[in-house]
Amino acid sequence: MAKRKNSPFKMAVIITLVIFAAMTALVVISTNNDSNTETSFEKQPPIDGQPILGDPNAPVTVVEFGDFKCPACNAWGESIFPQLVNDYVDTGKVKFAYINVLFHGKESELASLSAEAVYEQSPENYWTFHKELFNAQPPMENHDELWITNEKLLDIASNISGIDTQQLQEDIENQTTIEKVNLDSALVEEFDVSLTPTIMVNGTMLEDPFDYEKIKSLIEQELEGK
């Protein structure tokens, strides 16, 4: 009789434990999914000396780790970047900075050297040159072909008023901006950047750089001081 009397109680305990375990598992799964959405760092990438678009005193910083030979970076620049500029950069809420990534080897390095050289001699023309470099990417099926050459870079620069192409040629040949490119590579390692584009809002790195709603959410949180 004692066993019969205790059975309903034991069954209730077992059911309660099963429910608790299931709820705990759901919380763990949910937490893991959330952690996969973004990665937070104690600090944001330093942007002193980096090309900056927007008000330097804007309260929020968005950083792109990008590669001029990367098709996804080109796609991000065409689809997400204009929205970001319209909604936040032009309104003075966000400053945007670009850090070079050299995942495609010598071509990436050459493009980065030239972009940094343009920034050094003519900061007001940097973003035009930046955009035209991405515009010069070949169709996706020809992506792996060699296309970033000294000649191509000088041709792009020659169509932008205000860039001294002779100076640019000398800077490219002498690698005068190699220290700035190396500094960017060090930041890529420091922040464990493994894909391009990688987007950071202040100290938070997004898992999906094309999730504009998430970018907006992070910016708004920063603006609200959360």
Image (tube, helix red, strand yellow):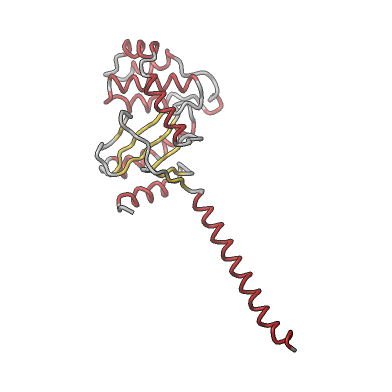
Q: Which quarter of the rendering shows the N terminus?
A: bottom right
Q: Is residue 74 visible?
A: no
Q: Position of residue 158 (x, y in %)?
A: 34, 15
Q: Residue furthest bottom?
A: 1
Q: Residue furthest front?
A: 2
Q: Is residue 10 left or right of residue 84?
A: right
Q: Is residue 127 left or right of residue 13?
A: left
Q: Nearer the viewer, residue 174 or 124?
A: 174
Residue displayed at 31% across by 28% down = 49
Q: Is residue 116 above or below residue 74?
A: above
Q: Looking at the image, how many numbered discs can be counted on the residues?
A: 0
Q: Position of residue 16 (x, y in %)?
A: 61, 74
Q: Which quarter of the rendering shows the C terminus?
A: bottom left
Q: Position of residue 85 (x, y in %)?
A: 32, 39
Q: Position of residue 152 (x, y in %)?
A: 42, 16
Q: Is residue 60 visible?
A: yes
Residue displayed at 32% across by 25% down = 126
Q: Is residue 219 above or below residue 156?
A: below
Q: Nearer the viewer, residue 89 or 190?
A: 190
Where on the picture, by quarter, is residue 64?
A: top left
Q: Nearer the viewer, residue 67 or 32?
A: 32
